[in-house]
Structures are given as structure tokens and as C-alpha cells.
Image (tube, coloured by chain):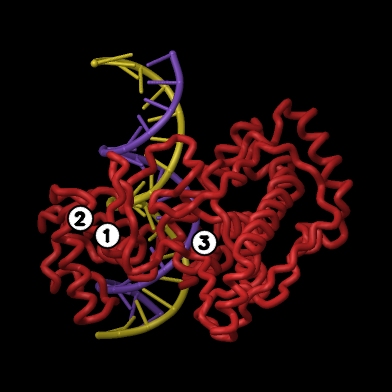
Chain colours: A red, B yellow, C purple
Amino acid sequence: MDGVQGGGRGCNNSSSASATIENEIHKEAEDQMDLRRGPWTVEEDLALMNYIANHGEGRWNSLARCAGLKRTGKSCRLRWLNYLRPDVRRGDITLEEQLLILELHSRWGNRWSKIAQHLPGRTDNEIKNYWRTRVQKHAKQLKCDVNSKQFKDTMRYLWMPRLVERIQAAAAASTAATNSSITTATAAGATSHHFNNNNNNNTTFQSSSGQMLLQPSHHFGASSHSHVTPSYTPDNSSTAASSDSFGAQVSPVSDLTDYYTPTTTATTTISVNNNPTPDNYLVQANHQVGSYDQCFNPGLGSEHFQGMEQQYNYQWGVDVGDISDNLWNVEDMWFLQEQLSNI
DNA sequence: AAAAGTTGCAACCGCGAGACT
DNA sequence: GAGTCTCGCGGTTGCAACTTT
């Protein structure tokens, strides 16, 4: 998966030249074979899925031919990995995922596939798109380069701590609301606290008229014509404050419009199931959720964040609380820490 | 209501690495 | 060892959907 490691790109000019010639030859061949490009149709998706179900994936060029698809192997692979694969997650990037993306990007930069490895079900393409559309947008709003120290500091000392706070707040609210039922379920050993609520066999769509529709997990039927529409119906609401595209609930506290108040004693105890099964994403019993300081910057105090925020409000003339997305929904802090501890 | 502008994301492209012949 | 094939990565583009004017 990690094919390009360490300065691989651009270090071999001779092979680069031959690769370019090869690609052009390949392209001509593609044109002669009348290969299709552009959006996939339902029929193509079905053909690809059926073929892979029967023969497995890999050898994409021959797979494309054998499946009767007038597509390049590359195109088939991409379609499968980014869209048709059963374990692909769809829907909004959760708070925990956002935090993880920010943290991992600060470590590894644009190593999207490597970052994606730590976000189960998310594709490198999706993470890349998230970064470009959301994070880079924020950098633009702050009128600074996404790679600048100012922006990186803003992320690390303002947005990420705030994300942690919101995760804590949501976890606390969720715990309070469901404490009794969780206790019952824990006794039965049956509470599966999934961080993903979009990956069920049946997925709820919201039609343009607001009608809720049940769809199989693989996205067909969202459109009556043969052209495949995007995998989910975008939420009509521009604020998207109440639900994501699959009807998953988005916390009303997810908007970072509240003014940041440093948390010095924010330690939330989540009392839920402790299931050793790795497949189940269960919040660990009595898991202590610390502040962002404790997670990533044990040496920094909350006064540091406060100073940072004041500095940026002054320097950029922007309330950092207003520049964040309002599309975030809320899951478990445990997921994040679990992921980071495995890295 | 319509035109113009913006956004989000699926898909494509070029390239490099490794496997295979 | 050289040539070819396949895979996978990161960057970019095209366009539908959405928002603003």
C-alpha cells in the first residue's frame, strides 16, 4: 500500500522519460479500444462488483477486460477502492477523524494513503478532498499559507484543542443521556458503540423532497436514470446542523461558533463497555478522556492556548471560532486515542 | 426566476516503485 | 540487466449541486 516511501518521486529521470512514452502509447491504445471515461453507470458498477465477487480483485487490466468493462484497469481499481468496496465509509468526517487527520497530517504531510490507513473505511481520496476543501479553505480565510507556521500553530493550538473539547462535551452529553441504557447493555455484553453509523447494510437516504429512503449499502437506486449519481444525496440544508447526508445525527454543538474557553479540568469519564474484540469499536470502561494538552502537548498549559487565540484574533482579525465547519458530528474520543496508540 | 459564482467530490492523470519476464 | 507490466500514490480537473446576487 505504501508504495512511494521516502523521496521516491522525481528521483529517476530516465525511467520517468520511458514511463511517459509508455503512458502515451498506452493512451493511444486506450483511444483505439474506445475506452470509456467519466462517471460510472450502474451497469458498470454491477459488472465490476459481480466480477470481483466471483474472482477477487487484483490484476486490474485483465480484470477490466474479463469483466467486459470498457475501462482501464486503473479506473476499475479506483472505482472499487474509493466507492464500491464494501467497507468504504461514507458521510461526514467525524470530529475524531478530523482530529486524527490534523494530527497525522502534521506528522506526515500529504501522505494521504498513510493517513487513510489509520481511518478505517476512509479512502485517501476522501481525506485528500477533505483537506483541500475544508482545511485549505480555512487557511485561505486566515490569509495564510496552509504550510505556514502560523497556520500550523493555529491548527495545533486552537482548532485541535477545540475539537477535543467538543468531543469531550459530546461524550459527556451522550453519556449522561444514555447512561442507564448503556449499563443495561453492558451487562448483556451487547453494546456495540460504532464510530461509524453509516456503514450498515441498510442506509438511510434523504430524498430531495425530504422523504427518508432506505437503500442497500451500495448506493444504487438513488437515481432512476443509468448515470450514477454521487453516492449519497447531499443534505438540503446549507447549515447541515441537524443531520448528515445519511440521516446520521450531527450535534448542534458541532459548530465552532462558541468562543474558545480553555479547559483545565476537563476530564470526562465514559462508563461503557470494555469489549476486547478488535472489530468492535467500543468505548473502554472508565476511559479517561483528557484535554488536548494531555493528548498531544503534555508540556503546554491552557494559558498557552488562550494566548494563542488572543494573538490570532488580533493578528488576523478573525474570530477563529467562526472559521470552522459546521458539518462535524460527534463520536467517541476513544476511537482517536485508540488509533493514535496503534501508530 | 435566472444568471453568476462557489463548493465538494468523483474521476482522471502523470509518475515512481516493484514484480515479472 | 533490460524491458514491460501492474500497482498505488499524490496532484489536478471537470462538473453537478448548491449558494449568492
Chain-order first, disc 2 or disc 1: 1
Disc 3 secondary structure class: loop
Image coordinates for residue A288, horizontal then vertical, percent: 75, 70
Tell me the number on the disc at residue A221: 2
The foreground one among A11 and A217 is: A217
- Quarter of the rendering containing residue A95: bottom right
Q: Residues under labels 2 and 3: Cα distance?
A: 46 Å
Tell me the number on the disc at residue A215: 1
Q: Residues under labels 3 and 1: Cα distance?
A: 47 Å
Q: Do tags 2 and 1 sit on the same chain?
A: yes
Amino acid at the residue labelled 3: Cys
Tell me the number on the disc at residue A191: none
Image coordinates for residue A312, horizontal then vertical, percent: 77, 34
Chain-order first, disc 3 or disc 1: 3
**In this view, C2 is above or below A303:** below
Q: Is residue A306 left or right of residue A15?
A: right
| Pointers 2 and 1 in contact (C-beta within 8 Å) | yes
Amino acid at the residue labelled 1: Gln
Disc 2 secondary structure class: loop
- Seen at 50% across and 49% down, the residue is A130
Image coordinates for residue A342, horizontal then vertical, percent: 63, 76
Q: Do tags 3 and 1 sit on the same chain?
A: yes
- Seen at 33% across and 70% down, the residue is A86
Tell me the number on the disc at residue A11: 3
Image coordinates for residue A322, horizontal then vertical, percent: 64, 34
Q: Chain of mark 2?
A: A
Amino acid at the residue labelled 2: Gly
